[in-house]
Amino acid sequence: MDVTLKLDVNGVERTVTTDPERKLLDVLREDLNLTGTKYGCGEGRCGACVVLIDGRRTYSCRVPVSAAARKSITTIEGLAQAGKLHPVQQAFLDEGAMQCGYCTPGMILSAVALLREKPNPTDEEIIAGMNGNMCRCNGYVKITNAVRRAAKAGR
Amino acid sequence: MDDKFSIPLSRTDDSSLSRRGFLQVLGSGVLITVTERLAVAQRSAAPADTRVVARLYLNEDGTITALSGKVEEGQGPRTELSQAAAEELRVPVDRVRLIMADTDLVPDDGITAGSRTTPQNVPPMRQAAATARELLTEHAARQWQADPTKLEVINGVVTNKATGQSITYADLAKSKEVVAAFAGNVRPGVAVTAVSDWKVLGQSVPKLGGQGLVTGQHQFPSDIRRPNMLYGKVLRAPSYEATLESIDLSAAQAMKDVVVVRDGAFVGLAAPTSHRAGQALEAVAKTARWKAAPRRVSHGNLHAYLKDHVDSGRARPNATGSIEKGFADATKTLAATYTLAYIQHAPMEPRAAVAEWSADGKVTVWAGCDGPYRARGYVAEACGVPAERVRVIIPDMGGGFGGKHSAEAAVEAARMAKAAGRPVWMRWTRNEEFTWAYCRPAAVIECKAGLNANHSLVAWDFTNINAGGAGIGTPYEVPNTRIVSVGSDSPVPQGSYRVLGATGNNFARECFMDEVAAAAGVDPLTFRLSHLQNARLRAVLQEAVERFGWANRVKKVTPELGVGLACGTEKNSVVATCVEIGIDRKAGEIRVREICQVFECGPILNPAGLLSQVQGCIMMGLGGALFEEIQFEDGKILNGTFSAYRVPRFRDVPKIDVHLINKTDIPSAGGGETPIIGLAPAIGNAVFAATGTRLRAMPLRLGKGGATD
C-alpha cells in the first residue's frame, strides 16, 4: 500500500508516494533522480550507498524510506554549497583519491561524518571510521591521505 | 582457459563511422582518421595486437575532440589518451575532449584489457596528433610562404617567430584547405615528441572527470535514466546449468504496470521501480520448477577434480633443451604442487545497462562492459537485428578488472526493452554478480626442478592446469625446460581477471624458486640473481631489496616475523616485491605489515596515475593472496555476498612503499596489471621464512598447507 511521505533531501522538501518498505537508496535513485548515491551490496557492507541522516553516516540500502521521513538527508549532490566543493570533496580531488570513482560518494560522505565527529582523527580513527566503505580499485592509500588532508584543512 | 582475448575484428566501413556521421555529431571542422590498413594487412597473422587506430577532430573553437574505442573503468585511459593528443598538438590537456566507447562515434579498438591501451592505443593517438600538428603548421607556412620547419606551435597557436605572424587552431579549423588536407591519412613515419621533451605526457595530470565523481554528477552505466523507463529483473536458475521446466507467470502478469517477458528460459520482469520488479520476480520465481544439472564437484575437492579432468588435447608444451636430459643430469630434484582458488572480480558497480529502442527499430544500449563493439555483437545476436541497428555507449564505469568482457546486462536490458516498448534498466545485484559473473580461474600448478652439484637449475618442468599461460615462462636461465598450460573442466563460469594466469604462475614459480633455493642451501636473493640475466628484472629486484633493507631484515626473522621477496615480468613490465609479515598464532592469521614494491613499465605517462595503479594492484593482490575464495557446492555459490566473501578493507592496508622506475629508452607498457603478481609469492615466502611451513595454496592460510603438504 503506497503512502505519501515528505523527505528533506539536501535542504529541499520532496514528496514521494511510494511503498514505505522501499529502501531509501532506491527512492533517491529512482524517484528523485539523485543517482550519486550508489548500490554496491544491498546489505550495508560496502558503503557505496552512504548518505547522512541528521549528520550521521547511514547505509541507505538498509533504510526503509519511511524511516527517513522528516529527517535531514544529505546526499553527495547536496554537499557542495553555492558551487563550492566541500573540503572533503576538494581533498579527494587534490589527492587524486579515486580510480573508477564509484565508491567515491560514499567514501566522501563517510569521511564527512567521521570528521564531524572527530575533527582531528588519528590514523587509527580514520581507518576505523572508513572501514565500512569498500573500494575495489583499492585506492585506500590515497583515500586515507585525502581524509587526513581534509582534516588538516578543517583545522 | 585460453589466455588470448578473442577480439571481434569486423568493422572499418560501417556507415555509422562515416565522415558524415561524425560531422552530424561533432559539427564542422577537421577530421583526421588513422587508417587501419596496417591492421587489416596483419590481421591474419596476429589479430588484436596489430590494430593502429585513432581519431582526432579539431573544433572551430580550437579545442580538440579525440575518439577512442577504449573504455574508462578507473584505470586512467581517458587521462593518458587525452595527454597523448595534447602533447603532440601542443595544447594543454583541458583543450582535449575524449569521446570513448560509443559505437556510433568511435573506432573499434577491441576490448579494454590486457594492459594494451598504453602500448597499443597511445602511440597511434600520438601519431595522429603529431600529423595534425604538421598539417596545420604546413598550411600556415604556405600562407606565409615560410619554411614549415621554422614555425612553432605553442598552446594551439602556430607562430612564425621571424615575422611575428601567428594563427590559432581555431582559425585554422575554419579553413577549407585545412579540412581537405586533413582528409589524408596519418603519416606512418611522423616524428612524435621525444620523452625528454614531454610537457603534458609524463606529468601527473589529475584524473579527467574527477569533478563529476566527487559531486556525484557523473552518470555511471547504472545511473542512466531515460524518460518512461522501467526497472528490470531477470529470473535466475537456483544452480548452474539447471533448466527451467515450467513457470506460472500469471501472478506477475496481474500486477499493475509490470511487463513480463518470456522467451524460452529467459524470464524478465520490468516495472516502474526496481522494488516492484523484485516483487514480480518473487511472485513468479516461487512457481518455477527447475531440473537440476547432475551433481558437480564442490570447492572442497576442486583441485583433484581439475587434475582429473585435464584436457590434454589443448596442451601446447613450450620446451628448451631436453627436460629428460636435464633431470638425468640433476643431482637433486624437487617437486611441488601449488593451487589457486576461484575468486571474483567484484567491481564496485555490478553489471548494468539501459536499453532503449527507437520507433525505427534501432536500439541504444548504455552498458558497463569492457568492449562496446563486442557488446554490440552480443545485443544484435540476442535481439535478432543487424549490428548496424545497435548502438552501444559505455559511460565511464565502476570497475572491471577483466571481469566485464561479457555484456549480460546489456543483452537482458535490450530484450526486455524490446518487449516492453519502453526503455529498460537492468543492474545485477551483488549476489547475481558473485554467482553469474565469471570467476578468475582456479588452478593446479605442478612444478618440478633439477639442480646440479653447483646449485644451478638444470631442469624446470612447470604445468598450469586450468588458469592459462600468461606469465608461465620462467625469467630465470635454465637450460632445459618444459612449460605447459593445459585446460580442464571448470565447474563454475570462468574467464579473464586482471593479469590473467600470471598471478598463479608467478605465485607458483616464485614460491618454488624459494623451495629450490632452500634445497640448494642458497639464500633466495642470491639464488635468483645467479639465474637472472634480464637486466630490467634485475634492476627492479636490486632496487627493491635495497629500499626494503633486505640484507639486514632477513637476519631478524623470527617465528613470528618473516620477510619474503618475489619478482616477475609480464605485459612488458617488471616488478619486484618485498614484504614483512607477522604471524598471529592466536588468531591463526598472517598479517602483512609492510610491502616494498619496485615497478618499471618504460617511460611513465602519468606518475600519479601509475602510482594509483600500483597501489591498487598491491591491495587487490593482497585479497587474492590472503582471503578471497569462491565457495560452491552443487552448482551453487555459497558465499556470494560481501559479508561472506572477504575483500581487502582499510584495516588491511599495510605500510606500502612504491617506487616507480622511469625507464625512458623503451616504449611505455601498461601498468595496471603486473604489479599484482608479486604479492602472493612474497607473502608465501615470508611465511616460510618465519615458520618453516610452505603454504602452497592461494589464498594463503595458516594450517592449510596446500596440495603437497
Image (cartoon, rainbow, N blue to C red):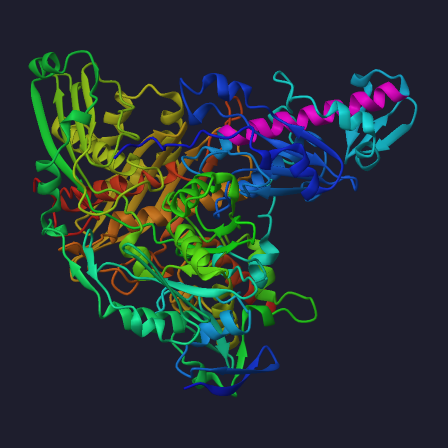
Task: Compare residues B35 and B391 and report the one nearer the observer.
Answer: B391
On the rendered structure, is A19 left or right of B481? right
Residue B696's place in the image compared with B359, above or below, is above
**Which range of residues does the magenta coloring cover?**
B120-143
Judge from the rendering whether residue B330 lies leftward or rightward of residue B599; answer left or right.
Answer: left
Name the quarter where the N terminus of chain B is drawn: top left
Q: Is residue B647 visible?
A: no
Residue B643: percent from left, percent from top = 28, 65
Q: Residue A30 location, x and y as percent?
A: 50, 70
Main SS, magenta region, reads helix
**Quadrant in the picture for residue B659:** top left
Residue sitting at 77 percent across and 28 percent down? B179
Residue appearing at x 11%, y 33% in the figure = B336
Quick check: is B700 in the magenta stretch? no
Name which quarter of the figure residue B159 lies in.
top right
Closer to us: B300 or B457: B300
Taking the magenta stretch, the answer to whether it contains residue B134 is: yes
Q: Is residue A121 above or below residue B414?
A: below
On the image, the x and y values in percent for residue B384 come to 41, 44
Residue B674, image x, y percentages? 38, 36
